[in-house]
Image (cartoon, grey):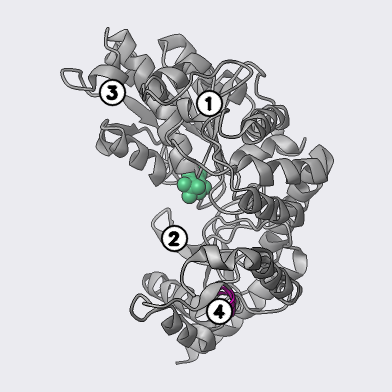
């Protein structure tokens, strides 16, 4: 049978298959390796020509479950420390299934009052969680990168208005480059957003006072004075190599003094606001004009979740609204059309997993989780300091630990190569995942602990496996 109409009665059976597979999969996540290379052969089953006659609903889904649960990178388990990747809390994952079950188009109030209201509610909760003013506008995005595009599109709108141009209507032609200033902690996705927005990624200038990229405030101050006109400052809370943060309060002072726009990248760092132990790192964020954060990192909701907050909600509408298709109805304060406030038009109800998770665990649950991760990172830092063949490269900040493998007798000039090979060996081994980066010119590991499942035992395992593979590498 080919037409899905004739398989209408199997819709729930197909979901039952997924639910049945979920229990052993989720139960196994605690113990299984992050990646089992022996399963890679399954990937071939994804290929082949487009079937003329399909496998039918259950056949197709069965195959996907078999290949998927075998060959996936089990990054939602507790020992994926690579990149900056969260898991999905039990409630968030179930909330995501509900979003799939209901399959709402969350672009227009008319299409789904449920999705629109849920988005308004979770944006309000998130502002509370992070201590952002209730009056900020906001929109859920698929990622921090798209949240950057959103916030910086508003910055661009604001900046062009100061040059007498409605950039949403007229474009950038005839305007000078938009000056954008940041520290060396800036994430590549900020440049990508500028590249997408036609501002050019190379227009971003960094002001650094040391090789860790910490901000040179005096240099930035002078450049802002020299720029004369409106400019954009990007402050970074939670950098990906060592978890470092810019002094947001000082950058907010600079922005105020020069009439500049302040954009904050708090992709995961914004969650420092949840604990009194780290809240000082985000002090001043409430003075920002636009703020980026991720849901699929420290909030631990499934992939494709980010948020953008913008002080002046009208700028969101200016940058993204009024595209005027005749079949669309205008929204209002109550009945919000989120497709007028962000990049996407049709979009999924990504508010639902966020709602489910915040409802399930509340401020207290999230604070406990964040503080556990702070402890786990500190524990990892201590393990590194105690190990004779590991070298901590930066004080532990937030949930990132930056270190390298440095066994006795290996000369400095060979350490970068050794650590790069160890990084590859670790990923090939698959029991735990962590990757390397360049920190102050050194090849270094930078595991991040922000998955809700991750505990101290998991970072102990990371150290064990890393030292074991390191010893093998140095012997050969
Ligand atoms: C992950 C990250 C981003 C990009 O986030 P995506 O969700 O992958 O687009 C931006 N900034 C920082 C600091 C990050 O850690």
Report the residue marked by disc 3.
178
Q: CA distance from mark 2 to mark 3?
A: 30 Å
Where residue 382 appears, x then y in whole percent?
71, 62
Q: Nearer the viewer, mark 4 or mark 3?
A: 4
Mark 3 burial class by Cα count in 10 Å: few <14, some 14-19, many 20+ = many
Q: CA distance from mark 1 to mark 4?
A: 38 Å
Residue drawn at point x = 44 percent, y = 42 percent: 145
What segment is highlighted magenta in the picture? 58-66
Q: Nearer the viewer, mark 1 or mark 3?
A: 1
Q: Nearer the viewer, mark 2 or mark 1?
A: 1
Report the residue marked by disc 1.
337
On the image, which quarter does residue 260 sit in?
Answer: top left
Where residue 178 appears, x then y in whole percent?
28, 23
Quadrant showing the C terminus: bottom left
Nearer the N terminus, badge 1 or badge 4? Answer: 4
The answer to whether one can see residue 285 in this image is yes
Task: Kindly state the secondary structure of the residue where label 3 is placed.
Answer: loop
Are discs 1 and 4 less than 8 Å apart at CB? no
Mark 2 burial class by Cα count in 10 Å: few <14, some 14-19, many 20+ = some
Nearer the N terminus, badge 2 or badge 1? Answer: 1
Task: Kindly state the secondary structure of the residue where label 1 is placed.
Answer: loop
Nearer the N terminus, badge 4 or badge 2? Answer: 4
**Residue 222, labelled with which disc?**
none
Magenta span: chief secondary structure: helix
User: Does residue 63 show up magenta in the picture?
Assistant: yes
Residue drawn at point x = 68 percent, y = 27 percent: 124
């Amino acid at each position: 049978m080919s037409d899905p109409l004739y398989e209408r009665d199997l819709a729930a059976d197909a979901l039952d298959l997924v639910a049945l597979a979920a229990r052993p999969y989720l139960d196994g996540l605690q113990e299984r390796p992050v990646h089992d290379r022996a399963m890679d052969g399954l990937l071939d089953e994804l290929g082949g020509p487009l079937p003329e006659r399909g496998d039918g609903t259950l056949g197709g889904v069965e195959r996907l479950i078999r290949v998927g649960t075998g060959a996936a990178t089990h990054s939602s388990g507790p020992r994926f420390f690579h990149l900056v990747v969260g898991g999905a809390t039990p409630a968030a994952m179930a909330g995501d299934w509900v979003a799939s079950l209901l399959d709402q188009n969350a672009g227009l109030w008319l299409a789904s009052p449920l999705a629109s209201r849920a988005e308004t509610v979770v944006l309000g909760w998130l502002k509370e969680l992070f201590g952002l003013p209730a009056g900020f506008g906001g929109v859920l995005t698929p990622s921090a990168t798209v949240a950057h595009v959103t916030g910086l599109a508003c910055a661009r709108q604001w900046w062009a208005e100061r040059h007498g141009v409605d950039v949403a209507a007229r474009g950038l032609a005839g305007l000078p480059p938009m000056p954008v200033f940041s520290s060396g902690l800036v994430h590549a996705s900020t440049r990508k957003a500028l590249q997408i927005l036609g501002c050019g990624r190379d227009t971003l200038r960094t002001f650094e006072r040391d090789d860790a990229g910490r901000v040179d405030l005096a240099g930035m101050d002078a450049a802002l004075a020299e720029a004369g006109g409106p400019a954009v400052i990007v402050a970074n809370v939670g950098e990906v190599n060592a978890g470092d943060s810019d002094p947001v309060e000082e950058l907010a002072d600079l922005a105020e003094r020069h009439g500049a726009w302040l954009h904050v990248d708090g992709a995961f760092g914004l969650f420092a606001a949840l604990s009194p132990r780290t809240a000082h790192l985000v002090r001043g964020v409430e003075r920002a004009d636009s703020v980026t954060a991720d849901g699929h990192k420290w909030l631990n909701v499934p992939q494709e979740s980010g948020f953008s907050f913008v002080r002046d909600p009208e700028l969101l509408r200016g940058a993204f609204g009024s595209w005027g298709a005749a079949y669309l109805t205008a929204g209002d304060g109550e009945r919000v059309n989120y497709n007028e406030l962000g990049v996407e038009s049709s979009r999924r109800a990504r508010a639902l997993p966020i709602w489910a998770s915040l409802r399930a665990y509340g401020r207290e649950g999230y604070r406990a989780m964040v503080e556990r991760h702070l402890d786990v990172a500190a524990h990892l830092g201590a393990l590194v300091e105690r190990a004779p063949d590991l070298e901590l490269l930066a004080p532990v900040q937030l949930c990132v630990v930056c270190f390298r493998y440095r066994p006795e007798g290996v000369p400095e000039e060979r350490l970068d190569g050794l650590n790069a090979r160890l990084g590859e060996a670790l990923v090939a081994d698959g029991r735990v995942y962590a990757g390397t980066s360049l920190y102050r010119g050194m090849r270094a590991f930078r595991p991040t602990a922000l998955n809700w499942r991750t505990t101290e035992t998991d970072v102990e395992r990371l150290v064990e496996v890393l030292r074991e593979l390191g010893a093998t590498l140095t012997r050969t």
